[in-house]
Image (cartoon, rainbow, N blue to C red):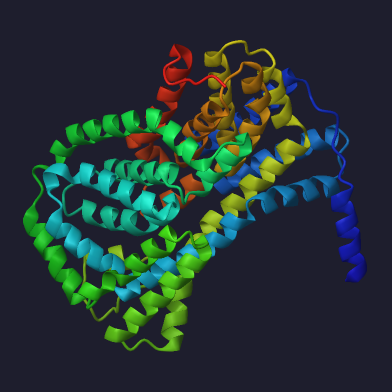
């Protein structure tokens, strides 16, 4: 075993990379990868796993042709996975968190009071605004979606709401919060990769983020009229079923309080989730007598109300969470990161960026190119962190050459990287959100107004010079 580990370590430290392809060849390879995944997923209806595996097989052929052995390509794939291993671990804990919040009554109680407070006339606006606020407090779009987002989707049927629009509102609000929160990992990465202060970065993002948020509110207000004919008697019926579940308690929202407080204290995300789970378990045992065996089952397969309770639709709403619910997401993340490792090893991504950056002569061109690079990396790899890191690093010299302040670049990669990731069906965020909410990415994509208005505004401001700062 020691010999095998030493050999593997030596292999990883002596990875061979083929000569970097020309920008034209890199563009062709990237285009074929996108074609493979888009045709198989959209036209053939394949699950993302199969599309990614087919794309990886295609890259295997390219790598073999360019002189890489399978062992070398496998090592590059492993390096790609390691770049996102934190997200893979985080998904385990989010699965536990959702199950704990369900069995403690935190999410059911939030749903119950949500039915009381939310008017069907302004349902989508409510979803957008509340997830925006919670998203800033938590600094995590995925946690916001997995908690408050799940509750809103659960309420959608009762308000006769379009689930796809509701999901678009949740995603828009969650990623507004993630983008603007000082607790957000993406904000920290975007500012650090270009070398500016985090709060200077956040202040500069206001110029594109606030207009995108206001436009989104107006659009959700226009759509909210669709819920005007909601049958409120159905709301009363669902509230009765929630009470029958035995999970509705005023103190059940305490885990959410702990979650927000720990996040505001800048406690590590996993520690924050663990603290929230412990609080949820304490609440759980104040009103139930779950055995350790039942608890383990819920944590693995997800919480499920007792079959003796006739909860109708509510039963399905409350059957959520568990580590097992994360497997679909985690396996896609592993495959997507593996593909990213292969594309990076073959020099495809560096060649694409290098072919663009030295030909840019104006602020508008530089911002558009950086935005398209971040967007393309999201589509190719499906990983928002890499979209920030690669595009930020690649275009920093270009922005310096054009005498543009680096905060323009950090804002651009956030507007085209962070908030675009949930719109890619095979991305880390896209897969997680579609599974957590039960709404396919392509269904909610047209209604995630904030996400693509952020991108459009940053490009528009780049070409017009509005809010663009010189160094």
Residue shown at the point (58%, 18%) measured from the top left: 366
Quarter of the image with the N terminus is: bottom right
Residue shown at the point (21%, 71%) measured from the top left: 311
Q: Is residue 419 above or below residue 94?
A: above
Residue 346 placed where, x, y %? 78, 34
Location of residue 449 (image quadrant): top left
Residue 373 placed where, x, y %? 59, 27
Quarter of the image with the C terminus is: top right
Residue 460 placed where, x, y %? 43, 18
Describe residue 469's horizontal placement relative to residue 339 as left or right: left
Q: How many marks?
A: 0
Q: Is residue 267 above or below residue 361?
A: below
Describe residue 323's horizontal placement relative to residue 82 as left or right: left
Location of residue 228 (image quadrant): top left
471, 322: nearer the viewer = 471
Residue shown at the point (16%, 48%) measured from the top left: 160
Q: Is residue 283 above or below residue 26?
A: below
Residue shown at the point (45%, 87%) measured from the top left: 292
Report if residue 185 is visible in the image. yes
């Amino acid at each position: 075993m020691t010999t095998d580990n030493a050999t593997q370590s030596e292999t990883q430290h002596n990875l061979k990379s083929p000569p970097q392809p020309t920008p034209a060849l890199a563009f062709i390879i990237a285009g074929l990868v996108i074609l493979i995944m888009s045709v198989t997923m959209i036209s053939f209806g394949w699950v993302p796993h199969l599309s990614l595996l087919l794309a990886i097989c295609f890259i295997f052929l390219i790598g073999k042709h360019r002189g890489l052995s399978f062992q070398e390509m496998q090592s590059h794939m492993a390096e790609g996975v390691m770049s996102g291993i934190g997200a893979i671990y985080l998904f385990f804990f989010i699965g536990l968190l959702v199950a704990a919040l369900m069995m403690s009554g935190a999410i059911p109680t939030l749903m119950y009071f949500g039915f009381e407070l939310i008017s069907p006339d302004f349902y989508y606006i409510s979803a957008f605004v509340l997830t925006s606020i919670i998203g800033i407090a938590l600094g995590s779009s995925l946690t916001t979606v997995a908690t408050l987002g799940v509750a809103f989707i659960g309420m959608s049927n009762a308000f006769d709401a379009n689930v796809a629009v509701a999901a678009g509102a949740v995603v828009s609000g969650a990623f507004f919060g993630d983008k603007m929160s000082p607790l957000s990992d993406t904000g920290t990465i975007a500012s650090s990769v270009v070398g500016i202060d985090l709060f200077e970065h956040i202040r500069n993002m206001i110029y594109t983020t606030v207009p995108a948020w206001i436009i989104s509110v107006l659009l959700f207000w226009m759509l909210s009229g669709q819920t005007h004919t909601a049958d409120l008697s159905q709301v009363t019926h669902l509230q009765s079923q929630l009470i029958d579940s035995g999970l509705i308690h005023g103190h059940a929202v305490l885990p959410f309080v702990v979650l927000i407080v720990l996040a505001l204290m800048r406690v590590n995300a996993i520690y924050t989730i663990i603290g929230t789970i412990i609080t949820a378990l304490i609440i759980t045992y104040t009103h139930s007598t779950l055995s350790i065996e039942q608890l383990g089952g819920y944590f693995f397969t997800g919480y499920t109300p007792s079959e003796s309770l006739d909860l109708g639709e509510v039963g399905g709403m409350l059957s959520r969470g568990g580590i097992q619910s994360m497997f679909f997401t985690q396996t896609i993340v592993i495959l997507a990161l593996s593909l990213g490792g292969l594309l990076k090893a073959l020099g495809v991504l560096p060649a694409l960026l290098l072919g663009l950056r030295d030909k840019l002569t104006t602020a508008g061109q530089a911002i558009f190119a950086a935005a398209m690079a971040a967007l393309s990396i999201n589509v190719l790899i499906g990983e928002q962190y890499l979209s920030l890191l690669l595009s930020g690093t690649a275009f920093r010299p270009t922005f310096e050459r054009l005498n543009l302040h680096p905060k323009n670049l950090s804002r651009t990669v956030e507007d085209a990287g962070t908030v675009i990731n949930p719109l890619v069906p095979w991305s880390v965020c896209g897969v997680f959100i579609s599974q957590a909410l039960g709404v396919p990415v392509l269904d909610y994509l047209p209604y995630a107004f904030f996400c693509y208005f952020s991108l459009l505004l940053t490009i528009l401001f780049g070409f017009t010079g509005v809010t663009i700062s010189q160094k």
